[in-house]
Every structure is written in structure tokens, then in C-alpha cells.
Image (tube, rainbow, N blue to C red):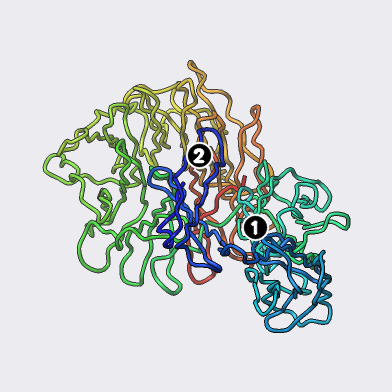
Amino acid sequence: MALEQPASGFTAVPTTIPSGESTATLTVHASASAAAGDTTLTVRATSGSEFQTAPLKLTVARAGELIVRWSSPAPGAPDTYTNGALQLEATLEGGTADAVEFRRDTEVLARMTAPPYSYTWNTQSEPEGEYPLTVRAIRGGTTFTSLERTVVVDRTPPVVAARSPASSDSQASARDSLDATFSEPVRASSIAQDNVEVLAHGNTRLDATVSLSSDGTRLTITPTSPLPAPSTVLVKLGTTTHPILDLAGNVLHSASEWVFTVPVWLPVGSALSAHAGATPSENAVVKMDSDDRPIVAWSEFDGASKNIHVARWDGDIWQHLGGGLSGLAGLGTDAENPDLHIDALGRVVIAWDEATGVESSRRVFLKRWTSSNWEDLPVLPRVDGFEIDARMPKLATAQNGALLLYAAGSGSRLRGLTLARGALEWTFANTSLPGDHFNPAQPALAVHGESVFVSYNTYLDTLERRGVAVLRNHQTLLGSGIVPAMPNHAANTSAIVTDHAGNPLVAWHTTDNETQDSELYFSQWTGTDWRTPAPVTATSSSNASPSLVIGSDHQTMLAWSGIVNSERVIRVARLQDDTWELLSPPLNANATPSTPSLKPSLALDAMNRPTVAWQEGSGVGADIYVYRFNH
């Protein structure tokens, strides 16, 4: 700590603040060459490359001269605020004076000829504003003046100028801090734990810490736990016995409290669509990238072509990763059924299928994001000189870092392929299905250690119905034939994950061959057999499109589309003791009727909180919506 470029005649030996302490004394010397009168020096404190400076105001007097000092307001204090009577006091050093005056600018407020030099200034009749005050001592024909002090007369109560979340906000985060910005600085001494209240549902007090910014204008309230969701939260600032005061002592305006709503789900940005207007956005899939941010892929028809689009959430808005993706050139492309994956190096990989224009044939294409553009991954190998007919691709990463791809092919084909790290060609995984499994479709992938599991729906000739089957490591069928299912029901889309022991869990929807109604079922491999499948829910009907995830906390969650009160909505549940427990009321983005919500995709962040994406119709088109669990 030292003086920074002191004026001529002023010196000080630099001093060090001892370790573990916060203060030290810096002694300033004024020589005979120092100019008489008021001066301001700069004190600089340095720690490594960081430093802070502070002004030091001094009055230099010659021998025999008087020094006039303020006693009240306290010397060295910043501007003084008042809303009524203000006590003014001064002292003299170096002798006596014939008279002492308290002056407001050039106007004499009070004059006295003997100590104590004290005056009570009643500011009630003064207009609000800043007033420069000095004390002047008169001896003979000479005057000696104190440093100037600024007094601010303020009788206007402070108000809350801004709130976060805003008052009546219906989309407040359960984890964000609460902020109140005041119209003017308030006293730090008037802020305490006991006069700032956060109340859930109007009467349940929530624990929170409070802090005031250094300039006294921003109060931050940090709940010690996430706010309950759903809930209505009331924030109260100040009490009758312990009000919040501004620097002049005015009480914070009574309309300072505010109310907001904490929902179960929060929208992540606005609806996703690559094109303006009523273009149909479909087949959304969401994953969390290496920075724990949601990234979404979907297909969208622009009136001429259907392409694949990818967007990443940057914390404020959705950033599109390049333009529309298509494996074939020209207009009229038909790309759909995207799957997203984050590979072993944290890179975004996208796969989709696309119509070739030759009868009903489709091909799978893959690309990888390089941080600035999409690069092609190696094309899939040919079979007998022909391109592979494949659709509904699914991606995963093997334990050794290789990229895995499964897709349904024509006839009785289920294609499994591997792209080793750094390899330039795909290799077939030698997938082998039982001889009585026909027309496999809609594969889903899960990896646990060295085990790769693929679920698919297939027609089992011996049972004469369509069911769900699971292969381990491309060839070993789990169980006998298919996962048990209800008679007279045909299995459709499946989803698969593995638990901490490496046993697969499967969810799928079936369609009643007579009523055409659909229902969700769930089963788990025990290590030797499949548990008896159980329906997921009775709270919605026509349930379809399951999306299944399991977190690092071993909590299994499921999303699906179902009908509640004649409206198709998204439902999300977690598995608790063999029972699916709904996380919230039905989820949809539009409150208007006839806006069906379809095909949800579920992902978990690093804290095992779900994010769900789905497509929702508007009557003339459809958009992609992304919501995150607010907890």
C-alpha cells in the first residue's frame, strides 16, 4: 500500500498489510513545500496483478492557521442523505475564532461565536436535491474553510424498479436467484434475513440468503433449495418493525412485494422451425451435447424439399448448425427419421434416411459437425454391388469408441454396422436374426460395457403376431422369440436402455388389432428371462411413441404421446418401485384445441433432469417444442 504519484511535498513510506489481516497504517508526511489548503491524494493497494485505489482528502495548514474540521456529518464519509433534521457539528484546531459559520453554498445557515459549534438544520422546507455545505471560521480579517460536504435532501420513498422473475411471470425457473432492483440505493443495515420473505403458495416460508450489491441498488435473494414446482411464490421486502430504508431513511414503498409462478416444465426458447410460415416440422430428437446443452434435430418440408435441420441451445437462443441437410442433390428430396448422437470425442453426429427416387427404396446418410460445418462420414458399404436399402437409423458408441449404426432394411433385414475410430470404412456387425423373425423394423440401441443391445419389432411366424425382440451383441436373442405381449396386439415403436447391472429395459406400444387403440408396455430383462410386461398408464389413451432414458442415479424415465380429455399431449413419468409416477400434468405448448403433440424425445442433463422435445401441430403446420424439467 502506497501513495500513487503524490503531489509535491507529500511523502509516505509504503507499507504491507500482514497476512491474514485486512488493515495497515500508512503515515503521510507533509513538508514545508506542500501547498496549503485542500488537496486529494490517491492511495493504491496492490496484490499481484490486481489493485485498488482510494482518494484521501487532506487540509494543509501553516503554523498559526486554523484547521476547520467536520464532526457531523462524519469526516471521510460519502455524501450525506437526509429527509428531515440534520445535525451539523464542527471543531477547530490551531487556535480560536471570532466566529464560525455553517454555510450552504454562499448562504449562511447559522453563525456562532463560541463553541460548541453545532446546528440542527431542518430540511423539511428545502426542495429535494444536493446541497454543498462548508464550515467557515473567521479570525480578524482572515477566513479558514473546511472541506466541502454534500448533503442530499431526499423525501421520496424508494420503489422496486425491476424484478427478476418479473411480477406475474408464469415461467420462473426453480433454480435461479431472485433479484430486486431499487430506484435508489438502500441502507445495507436495513436488509436482513428476517425482513425478506420468500413464500410458496402464499404461506410456506422458504429458506434463502440475501445480499445487497456494493452500490446498494440490487438485492439478490438465493433460495437454499430449488423453488417447489408447481407453485406460486410471493416475495415480501421489509416488515412493519424492520422496514427497508433508503440512505435518507425513507421506507421502501409498500407495493414492493411481487408474485410469480414456478411451473413444472420450462420452455427452452421459442418453437423451432427452419422456415417461416406453416411448414411441417417433424420427427424431433433431442440429446445433450458435451457442454450439457440441448441439441435438436428434426425433418421439415419447405414446400419443395424435406431436409434435416439441427439446432443447438446456446443459453439464450437456438443456433442452427448449418443449413438443411440432404444426402441427395436437387429439389424434391425426402429426408426424414433423423437420429442424433454425441460420439466418444464429444462431436455431434447425425444420421437419417432419404428416398432414392427408385420405387420405395431409401438410403441412410451420416454427417458430423466440425464446429463450423457438416462433414460427410463414410458412405455405407454396398452389398452385391447395390446400395443398402435402409431406414430408421439409430446411433450409439461402443465401449472402444467405435460408432455403431443400426437400420431396418428391406425384407427380413436388420443392418448393424461399425465405424472404428479413425476408420474410413464401415464394417458389418454380422447381425443374425432368428429364422422366424420377419420384417424387422424400428430398431433402438443401448450399450453397456462390452454389450450392445438392439430392440426391434418383428413378425414372429410361429405366434402369428408382431412383437418386440432384443438382440445382444448382434446375434444372441434374449428370451424365447419375443418379449411377451398381449394376444391380438401388434407391437410397434420400441425404446431401450440398460440399468446399472447391464440388464436391458424396454418400452413399446402395441395396437389392438380389433379396436386399433394403442397402449404402452414395459418390461425388464432379469438376466434369465423377461418380466411380465405391464401397461405403463391408465391416465391417457391411445398411447404411442415411447422415449426411454435412465440416469446416472439409476432413475428410469419415460415420455410418450397420449390422449387426455380429447387432446393428444405429452406425458413424462419416472419408474418408482415398479410403478410409473407422472412428473406433471399433461404437457403441451399450445392451449388451443386440435394441436396434437406427437413423437416425444427425452434426454437427461448432467444433473439427471429431463429435457423433452416433440412436434406439435397448429392446424396448418407443426413446430418443434423443447421443454426442460424445472427442478
Image point (26%, 32%), residue name? 402
Label whose residue precedes the other's in the sequence (2 or 1): 2
Q: Label 2 is placed on what type of residue?
A: Ile
Mark 1 residue element? strand
Instruction: Give the residue at x 59% y 42%.
Output: 519
Pointer 1 residue: 179
Q: Amino acid at mark 1?
A: Asp
Callout in the foreground (2, 1)? 2
Q: What residue is shown at x 27% (from left), y 56% (from top)?
A: 355
> Real-space Cα distance between discs 2 and 1?
35 Å
Q: Extreme right residue here? A: 241
Label 2, secondary structure: give it. loop
Circle 1 packing at 10 Å, graded few (<14), some (14-19), many (20+), is: many
Q: Residue at x 29, y 27 (%)?
A: 432
Q: Is residue 487 visible?
A: no
Q: Nearer the viewer, residue 65 or 451?
A: 65
Q: Nearer the viewer, residue 85 or 59?
A: 59
